[in-house]
Image (cartoon, rainbow, N blue to C red):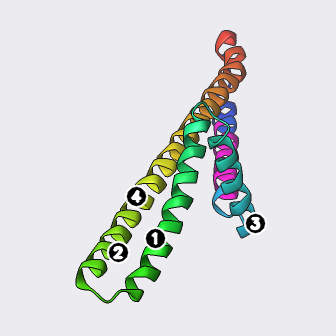
Amino acid sequence: MTNPTHHQTDDRVLDEQIKAALQADSNSSFTGQVATIIEELSQTFSGQHRVLLLWSVGKLFGAAVILIVSIYQFFQQDTMMALIAYASLAIICVIAEATIFLTIWISIQNNNRQRDTKRLELQVALLNDRLLPLITKE
């Protein structure tokens, strides 16, 4: 029979390793956060739906250009009808940009969730390999 304090020591060491890893993730520097964002974007745009996401980014920039032009034209107009038209166009562009941004953000979050699930599966498999000899000894 194995010593129960030995298992408790292993559990404490494992807990400390998990806490240290979580603390390292939460205390990352600004440059580390920027690198993480760049990595997330590159993974998102190299995934299964990369063509659609790149097309969405093109639409995002197109909507931004139209938004800038419509705001400029809004202040150049003299008639109420033209003011309403350019204001409506600006509102539609803002809504389109928000929608496209949310679509890309959801895709990034989905990729992060899949990556974290794969990491968790790997850690469970490694933990299973570590615990299997302990279970078979008893």
Name the side, left or right, on which 4 lies relative to 70: right
Alpha-carbon distance for marks 3 and 2? 40 Å
Q: Amino acid at mark 1?
A: Leu
Crowding at mark 4 (Cα within 10 Å: few <14, some 14-19, many 20+): some
Residue named by callout 2: 86
Which residues lie in the magenta part?
Answer: 11-24
Residue named by callout 4: 96
Q: Of the two numbered discs 1 and 3 on the same chain, state the one appearing first in sequence.
A: 3
Q: Amino acid at mark 4?
A: Ala
Q: Of the two numbered discs 4 and 3 on the same chain, state the one appearing first in sequence.
A: 3
Q: Is residue 85 magenta?
A: no
Q: Amino acid at mark 3?
A: Thr
Alpha-carbon distance for marks 1 and 3? 32 Å
Crowding at mark 2 (Cα within 10 Å: few <14, some 14-19, many 20+): many
Label placed on residue 67: 1
Alpha-carbon distance for marks 4 and 3? 31 Å
Label placed on residue 118: none
Name the side, left or right, on which 64 lies relative to 124: left
Alpha-carbon distance for marks 1 and 4? 10 Å
Q: Nearer the viewer, mark 2 or mark 1?
A: 2
Give the position of the N terminus as an image quadrant.
top right
Q: Residue at x 71, y 69 (%)?
A: 30
* Residue 56 placement (x, y as % from top left): 53, 48
Q: Secondary structure at mark 1?
A: helix
Name the side, left or right, on which 94 lies relative to 132: left
Q: Of the two numbered discs 3 and 2 on the same chain, state the one appearing first in sequence.
A: 3
Is 22 or 4 nearer to us in this picture?
A: 22
Residue 73 in the image: above or below residue 26: below
Residue named by callout 3: 31
* Residue 115 placement (x, y as % from top left): 61, 36
